[in-house]
Amino acid sequence: MKVIVTGASGVLGTAVYAAFKKGGHEVLGLANSRATGELKKVNITNKGETEAVFKEFQPNWVIHCAAERRPDVAEKNPEGARVLNVSASEYLAHLSRDLRFTLIYISTDYVFDGTSPPYTPSSQTNPVNLYGRTKRDGEIAVLGVQGAKSIVLRVPVLYGPAPKNSDTAVNILLDVVEDQSGKTYKMDHYATRYPTNVVDIANFLVRLSALRNVTLPPIMHYSAAEPFTKYEMCLIFAKILGLPHSHIIPDAEAPKGEAATSRPRDCQLYTRETEDLGVEGGLGLSLFEEWWTEYLKDSQ
């Protein structure tokens, strides 16, 4: 199978690219600002450039990981977030229709407001910040292109192997725990998150692509089941690393003030429909503390 991965230099894109290559598929990884090594530099907001690459490669599947995923950055540059998260995604759906490939649009649990979890694929969306709105609008755009084979895959906050800890909202907590300089940190102990491993998602997508004679639903949920606040994740990292954590102060208050980007409280994704597809090995989820214990031991 021929597969294109957009955003292939990001944390999820890197894992997806590696998993499909390991699975013996012909894979083209696209990146823009960090196009190094085997990755091809393509600005997917440039329609002509994107169309030329896709027509030449003729993919069977496209995993669309490229996005502005940082809520605070999206708030500061709403037009940039909209172009990447909505317009570029819609154009890929048009290419999906014309070139007859399956488009997997990676979306987020932040399309929900966090007030009545768990959320099924058919639950009413109601994003509370601009990032969530652009991803919700991206979903509507790709699913609205008649004749395209587009599938939305919603995932929660991600973690896993990363070029830099700052590449994910989970990995960066390691830097907070390891900062023993005397600086103190207020850490969110308000919002419940379901951190999910990018390697698990990538391997699941490879197994999903092998399904035959199964019609995939237009919206799918993939999520780990373990709930943590960011503060609780910090406590796990401190335990694994054997470091004190008194410099990390739990903050159980909802974000407020003009400078605070709204975050939903609990966007747990209901995954039963995904589990019922019959993908070999099921969701194949890692346990958070167990995975990090092994990973950090190996990386020391």
Image (cartoon, rainbow, N blue to C red):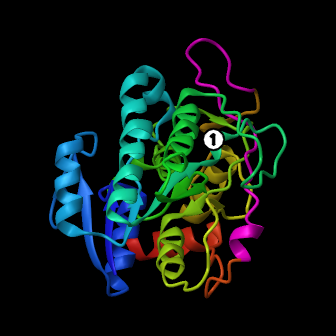
Numbered range of the magenta stretch: 254-276
Q: Is residue 148 left or right of residue 245?
A: left
Instruction: Please say if 68 is above or below 225.
Output: above
Q: Is residue 196 left or right of residue 268?
A: left
**Residue lying at 45% horizontally and 29% vertically, measured from the top left:** 74
Q: What's the amino acid at mark 1? A: Tyr
Quadrant where the C terminus is found in the figure: bottom left
**In-front residue for pair 256/3:** 3
In the image, is residue 257 part of the stretch drawn in magenta? Answer: yes
Mark 1: which secondary structure? helix
Would residue 162 be seen by someone viewing this image from the given angle? no
Quadrant where the N terminus is found in the figure: bottom left
**Residue lying at 31% horizontally and 80% vertically, measured from the top left:** 21
Q: Is residue 131 left or right of residue 116?
A: left
**Residue lying at 34% horizontally and 84% vertically, measured from the top left:** 22
Image position, residue 114 (x, y; %): 76, 39
